[in-house]
Amino acid sequence: MLHRRKSGEEKEKEYMFTPDSSTTPLFGSSESNHILPRETINDNAINPNIAYQLISDEMMHDGNPRYNLCTFVQTYMEPEAKQVMVDAIATNAIDKAEYPQTTEVEKRCVSIISDLWNAPKDEEYMGTSTVGSSEACMLGGMAMKFRWRKRAQALGIDINAKKPNLIVSSGFQVVWEKFCVYWDVELRELPMKSLEELYLDPKAAVAACDEYTIGIVPIMGITYTGTFDDIVALDKAVEEYNKTAKISVPIHVDAASGG
Ligand SMILES: Cc1ncc(COP(=O)(O)O)c(C=O)c1O
């Protein structure tokens, strides 16, 4: 006996009126016989477990932190740490008045980090949580720019004569380029010298400074190699430079992955 092939419309109706049940195998569902739209919302609801499976299968092709240490993401995290994140999903952490206990925990984290970094006890440290290191770099960059502008004005430097600049090695993470574009700062990119010396050369960094330099950014965890810039050597060179400079230059350590 010959069967007539079902039309697309008939298949669609069948799909709409054949509900899945809890016993429907994941890959035998009515949805699996239906091409879901990619760029628009589907007309019919689909089971959450199927929606989850589709998305997580698609993400499978992205880098897996357990396989690849170069992604700079956490390679492993205890399930409890993930649970804390899920628990906090409904918290608007920016609203310090509405979520005072979250704010308190944030303050303790800032304190722990300042202690780990040996912040001088007699100084009032400042810190905040951010959504990743890119936001942290943006905040650090803005602080450097505004601080430079205030000090330059006080010293009688014409702040409009030239763009302010930021010094970093060519191993920088893309966020620094974004910062410079968004905040109209010249990115003074210094090449890394050779395959053996894939880091910021302190002497070259200081030689690139002028009255318009808002700061130097050494990196702890250079994106391409994972190596650390020599912060101590850079600090020494910058201190020497600052002794005679018209306007002193600060260092901002991008410790996104190695801090
Ligand atoms: C050195 C460095 N700076 C900044 C960033 C940006 O961090 P995020 O991706 O968390 O915004 C990264 C991330 O790869 C990094 O390795």
Image (tube, rainbow, N blue to C red):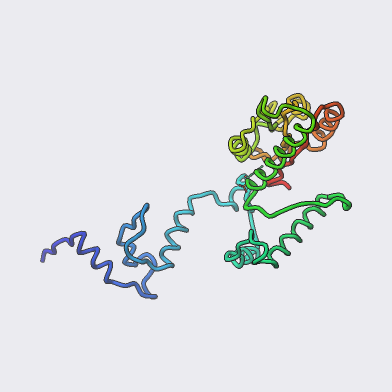
Q: Left or right of 11: which side holds 219?
A: right
Q: Nearer the viewer, residue 99 or 62?
A: 99
Residue 191 visible, this angle? no
x and y percentages locating residue 251 in the rendered image: 76, 37
Q: Is residue 233 above or below residue 8?
A: above
Ligand 1 appears in which quadrant? top right
Residue 222 visible, this angle? yes
Q: Is residue 30 above or below residue 224?
A: below
Q: Residue at x 63, y 53 (%)?
A: 75
x and y percentages locating residue 93 in the rendered image: 64, 61
Kindly indicate the quadrant of the structure image that contains residue 203.
top right
Quadrant location, the N terminus = bottom left
x and y percentages locating residue 62 in the rendered image: 51, 49
Kindly indicate the quadrant of the structure image that contains residue 57.
bottom left
Residue lying at the far left of the rendered structure = 1
Residue lying at the far right of the rendered structure = 122
Q: Is residue 87 above or below residue 148?
A: below
Q: Nearer the viewer, residue 2 or 53?
A: 53
Q: Left or right of 232: which side holds 228?
A: left
Q: Is residue 203 above or below residue 51?
A: above
Q: Nearer the viewer, residue 107 or 74?
A: 107
